[in-house]
Image (spheres, helix red, strand yellow):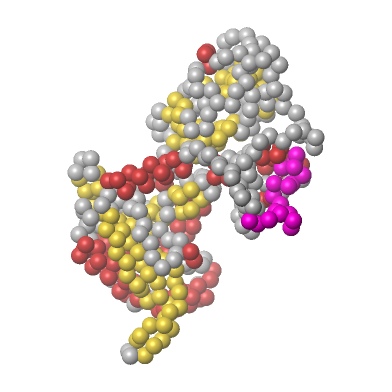
Amino acid sequence: MGRYVFKLPDVGEGTAEAEIVAWHVAVGQTIEEDAPLVDVMTDKATVEMTSPVAGKVIEINGAPGDMAPVGSGIVVLEVEGAGNAAGAASAPAVVQEAVTAPIAKSEPAPSKPLEAAPVKAATPAPTVSAPAFPNRPEGEKPLASPAVRRRAEDLGIKLGFVPGSGPAGRIEHADLDAFIASNGATARAPSPGGSSYAQRTAVEAVKVIGLRRKIAEKMQDAKRRIPHFAYIEEVDMTELEDLRAHLNVIHKGRGKLTVLPFFMRALVKVLPDYPQINARFDDDAGVVHRHAGVHIGIATQTANGLIVPVVKHAETMDLWAAAAEVARVSTAARDNKAKSDELSGSTITITSLGPLGGIATTPVINHPEVAIIGPNKIVERPVVRGGQVVVRKMMNLSSSFDHRVVDGYDAAEFIQRVKGLLEHPATLFID
């Protein structure tokens, strides 16, 4: 028997280190080749590392939230053959969940390491902090690694009913163990005899790691560095909505159009007259980079948090091409398959809560950009037109600007130009 040290590879272009997000193995567990080992993250890309060999896990280095240098040994396996590491294969295993010291400094564990065994009904359940409402909305895909999914399938368990204790509600092996041991009780509603007014005293400590930490840092940096100027205007979307419905009927084979491609088209038309808005501000160097190309960030909610994939050169796209590209990059972001260049380089961002859009928002600028546009929910409201009260499809358009770069007058004029195009959609296609 030999020892195989799995070293963290370069998971990005020239990345020096990566954050450990979640482990999929435990000390004493026997795994197959290509089995998931650990999720690591650099910038906003999370990558699942798999084992290049089969073997038994005898050492784990690093806890979720720790930074691991590229090339460092994060997992040690006992394997058939010589392995790739010098030293006796019978060396004591290190039984620990979080090791931050180098492999050579690890402390010996008990002589009988924990052996992985099939879960039995009588096995005591590990302590798992289940969410208050573990059942997910219908249609929402539970987050879990391929290994957890395979195990749940083998056990005949639907992951939609299993509460997850990992980052962003990710379902871990321990969650399956708890679900089995409780006979599914963790996913059931309170019993009829229980009181809905019972005192709740539990406190859940959630470490801010991975993408959530990146989001927190970026939002904090944006609000600390950028003096935001908010501007909100209402837009009559009646004609645009009629046009959109008509185009979806006569061109149904080209894909369904949402409102978003029309917004993108409006930005493409107006931004050349406001180059200071289609820009990125390097405030450390004191330089505003004004871009000719319109690279629109699309704020996308994922299971792990908010990610902003980018539609590059939106000025070259018609409505359907823009819709297709939005769908492609958004899906890649949600599936954690977006490439690094698809998550960077935006010059202006659109953020929309869709049907949850509310009355108005004050969106946070995606630093180092200088503007962000936030369409709100379209609702039918009575408005006065030509002295008559009529029902129109109205929407509030929220926006924020970096007041260091964009003057209030220019921001208001810019939004008024966008409003004019949206209210008279034929002008979107007139050069």
Front residue of 26/153: it is 26
Front residue of 189/315: it is 189
**With respect to residue 25, does 189 lie above or below?**
below
**x, y (%) of residue 341?**
40, 44
Whether residue 1 can be seen here: no
**x, y (%) of residue 198?**
64, 52
**With respect to residue 331, does 99 lie above or below?**
above
- Tell me which corner region of the image, top left, top right, bottom left or bottom right, holds residue 320: bottom left
Residue drawn at (53%, 23%) of the image: 99
**With respect to residue 252, does 385 lie above or below?**
below
Q: Which residues are magenta?
A: 179-197
- Tell me which corner region of the image, top left, top right, bottom left or bottom right, holds residue 130: top right
Residue drawn at (57%, 10%) of the image: 86
Front residue of 412/294: it is 412
Q: In the rendered view, does 77 fall on the left or right side of 269?
A: right
Q: Specify the principal SS of the magenta part.
A: loop
Residue drawn at (80%, 37%) of the image: 121
